[in-house]
Image (tube, helix red, strand yellow):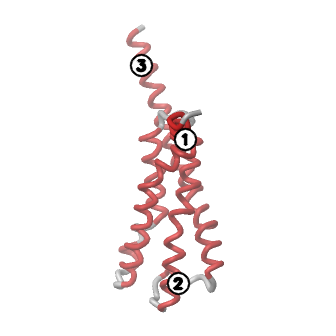
Amino acid sequence: MNNTEVASEKKSSIIWQALQIIKIPVMISWLITALRFVLELVKIPEHFIFFIGLLWFTLGCSIYWPIKFHSKKQFYLLFILALLIFSPLSRIPVALAWWIDTYWQLGTHYGFYFDTFGQVLWNQVFYGTLVQIIPGAIIGALTFAIITQKNKSKLKNKTISNG
């Protein structure tokens, strides 16, 4: 196998495709966490910044990805894999925000709940990931089902009108 065949096979792998789908959303999620952290530091009330969060962004991605990529081979597997990779990576800055908040006693919500970095990692990277994946998968599956049904209806109407 030569280098071009290896590169082509790598690009066609489902993991490679998932990584390509999530690379920009992961960077955006890191910016979202940084923005929310800064807004809390300047004492913006919680009810104004509530919707600036990773769950809301994940739900948006879970609607966007099926619309954009529904025609890809093995889309649902690709979608779930993208969520499984995206969610823990998006939570890493939350653990960092906890460390910054507790080290300098800044008083943001990031420092309220945990005593050790191990607790933060477990809760943010495992539990926080589940909080993103479960509703994201449900929303994504519903979006994918709607798109699939819509495409079937278009095909059926086209067949009837051509028949």
Contact, mark 1 vs mark 3 (Cβ under 8 Å): no
- Identified by mark 3, the residue type is Asn
Mark 3–mark 2 distance (CA, rounded to whole Å) = 56 Å
Q: Amino acid at mark 1?
A: Lys
Quadrant for the C terminus, please. Answer: top left
The earlier-in-sequence mark between 1 and 3 is 1
Residue ID for mark 2: 111
N-terminal of the pair, mark 3 or mark 2, is 2
User: Which mark's residue is nearer the viewer, 3 or 2?
Assistant: 2
Secondary element type, mark 2: helix
Kindly indicate whether the residue at mark 2 contacts the one at mark 1 (C-beta within 8 angstroms).
no
Q: As displayed, is residue 26 above or below residue 123?
A: above
Horizontal arrangement in the rendering, residue 69 relative to residue 73 (left or right): left
> In percent of the image, x 45 and y 54: which residue is there?
23
Residue to which mark 1 is pinned = 10
Q: Earlier in the sequence, mark 1 or mark 2?
A: 1
Mark 1, mark 3: which one is toward the viewer? 1
Q: 10 Å neighbourhood of mark 2: few (<14), some, or many (≥20)?
A: many
Check the image and name the residue furthest to the bottom: 105
Mark 3: which secondary structure?
A: helix
Write the residue at 41% across / 77% down. 37
For the N terminus, the image quarter is top right
